[in-house]
């Protein structure tokens, strides 16, 4: 999603700044800036490798499956679903959304890929193998991030709420409010479900939050400012927004909108 003053997202930019400032004062928003573990032993994460990323990709969703990255991109006329070779960054497979749709988060369940759109209230379902569109679904409000816990789709919409959706009927099963000690945290963007927790980018920040999906409590925040400095993005929209996890290799892949690099990292236990 772009940062535009007249958009609903732009209108929410100030409140999240207030939330973050209050949280910092309260003492929970305190993760340190880190660099490669070789330079700072004991850091929260270690950079294992760097892989090329399409600098024109406005990344809105990312996940890892069977040795590949699947990426959803945004902006009208540029919104895509992609299968990407990690080592080369080469696009192996791609499906384009019609111009009127601004692509958002993606998730996979049962050989189906689901993709949100920003303000259209329209989601799409694809066959994972062919990328052929096999369905559509509707939802109220905006669509931001999307992931799956294996039973439900989990969706963010820019508010502090995460919605849990039935992957067949798309009915809302339940929702949780994401809260830190100082109150609700909004601007939750790209999502990933890992080892029983939801991980969320916070839009226009370098933070990834670990969230308890039962209570909505933020249990950890990791500061990836060092990755942004390494990527050196030049566009003001080029913010951190892409989390993928390889369970077998216990490795994470992080990137941002319009970033030239996908970072392969290992996150240390708290």
Image: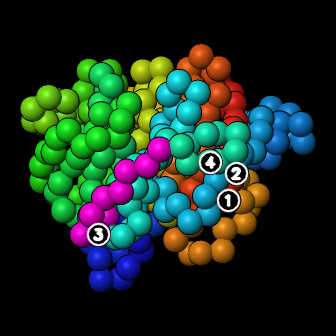
Most foreground residue, 86 or 165: 86
Label pair 1/2, CB-CB below 8 angstroms: yes
Q: CA distance from mark 4 to mark 1?
A: 13 Å
Residue 62: numbered disc: none
> Please, what secondary structure does the residue beneath circle 4 have?
loop
Most foreground residue, 180 or 247: 247
Q: CA distance from mark 3 to mark 4?
A: 23 Å
Quadrant of image for the C terminus: top right
Residue 266 lies in the magenta stretch: no
> Please, what secondary structure does the residue beneath circle 2 have?
strand
User: Eyeballing the image, is 30 above or below 141?
Assistant: above
Q: Which residue is mark 3?
A: 99
First reached walking from the N terminus: tag 2 or tag 4: 2
Q: Where does the image place residue 132, in percent across and percent down from the top left?
A: 29, 41
Q: Where does the image place residue 241, in percent across and percent down from the top left?
A: 51, 53
Residue 260: numbered disc: 1
Give the label, 4 or 1, closer to the camera.
4
Q: Which residue is mark 2?
A: 52
Q: Which residue is mark 4?
A: 90
Residue at 52% x, 60% y is 57
Label pair 2/4, CB-CB below 8 angstroms: no
- Where are the magenta residues, as a range? 93-102
First reached walking from the N terminus: tag 1 or tag 2: 2
> Please, what secondary structure does the residue beneath circle 1 have?
loop
Give the label, 1 or 3, closer to the camera.
3
């Amino acid at each position: 999603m772009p940062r535009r003053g007249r958009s609903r997202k732009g209108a929410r930019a100030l409140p999240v700044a207030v939330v973050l400032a209050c949280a910092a004062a309260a003492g929970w928003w305190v993760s340190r800036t880190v660099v490669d573990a070789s330079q700072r032993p004991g850091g929260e994460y270690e950079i294992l490798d760097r892989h090329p990323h399409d600098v024109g990709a406005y990344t809105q969703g990312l996940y890892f499956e069977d040795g590949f990255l699947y990426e959803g991109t945004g902006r009208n006329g540029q919104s895509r679903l992609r299968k990407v070779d990690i080592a080369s960054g080469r696009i192996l497979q791609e499906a384009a959304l019609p111009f009127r749709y601004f692509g958002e988060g993606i998730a996979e369940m049962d050989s189906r890929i689901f993709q949100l759109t920003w303000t259209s209230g329209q989601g799409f379902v694809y066959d994972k193998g062919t990328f052929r569109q096999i369905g559509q679904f509707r939802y109220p409000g905006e669509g931001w991030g999307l992931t799956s816990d294996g039973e439900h789709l989990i969706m963010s919409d820019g508010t502090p709420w995460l919605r849990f959706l039935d992957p067949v009927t798309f009915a809302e099963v339940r929702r949780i409010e994401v809260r830190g000690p100082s109150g609700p945290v909004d601007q939750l963007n790209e999502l990933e479900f890992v080892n029983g927790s939801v991980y969320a980018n916070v839009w226009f920040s370098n933070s990834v939050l670990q969230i308890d999906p039962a209570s909505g409590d933020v249990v950890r925040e990791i500061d990836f400012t060092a990755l942004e400095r390494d990527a050196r993005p030049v566009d003001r929209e080029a913010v951190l927004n892409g989390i993928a996890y390889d369970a077998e290799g216990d490795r994470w892949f992080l990137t941002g909108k319009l970033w030239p690099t996908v970072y392969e990292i290992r996150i240390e236990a708290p």
